[in-house]
Image: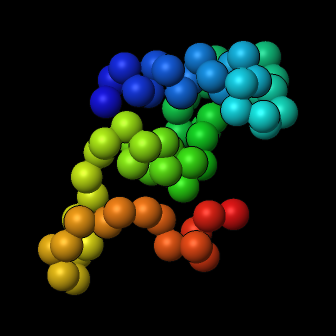
C-alpha cells in the first residue's frame, strides 16, 4: 500500500493523472486525491474490499461514485 501511495503521489505531482497541478507547498495524500480515485486504483492493483452488509468482495466501484 505504501508503494501505491508513492506512485499515486508521483503521478499526481507530475500531472500524469490529467488533473490540474497542485499549487506550491507541502501536500498530504488526503489533500491530493479523491477517495474514489484511490479506491479505483487500489482495485486495479488487486486490493480486495468487502461489502459491509454481505461480506462479498467488491469487484468495482458503483457507477454513482465514478464521477
Tally the numbered discs: 0
Q: In the figure, residue 23 lies in which quadrant? A: top right
Residue farthest to the bottom, as pictured: 53
Q: How is the image coloured?
A: rainbow
* Residue 31 horizontal side relative to residue 59, left or right: right
Residue 54 in the image: x percent, y percent? Answer: 18, 81
Q: Position of residue 21 (x, y in %)?
A: 80, 26
Front-most of 22 and 40?
Answer: 40
- Residue 64 lies left or right of residue 43; in this view the side is right
Residue at point 44%, 27% (across, down)? 5
Q: Quadrant of the N terminus?
A: top left
Q: Quadrant of residue 56?
A: bottom left
Which residue is rendered at x = 58% and y = 73% of the image?
A: 63
Q: Residue at x 31, y 42 (%)?
A: 46
The percent position of residue 55, horizontal first and vertical second, equals 15, 74
Which sits in the foreground, 16 or 34?
16
Q: Is residue 40 left or right of residue 33?
A: left
Residue 39 screen position, x and y as percent:
45, 50
Which quadrant: the C terminus?
bottom right
Amino acid at each position: 500500500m505504501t508503494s501505491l501511495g508513492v506512485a499515486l503521489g508521483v503521478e499526481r505531482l507530475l500531472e500524469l493523472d490529467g488533473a490540474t497541478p497542485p499549487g506550491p507547498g507541502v501536500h498530504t495524500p488526503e489533500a491530493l486525491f479523491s477517495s474514489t480515485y484511490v479506491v479505483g486504483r487500489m482495485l486495479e492493483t488487486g486490493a480486495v474490499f468487502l461489502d459491509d452488509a454481505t461480506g462479498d468482495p467488491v469487484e468495482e466501484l458503483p457507477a454513482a461514485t465514478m464521477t
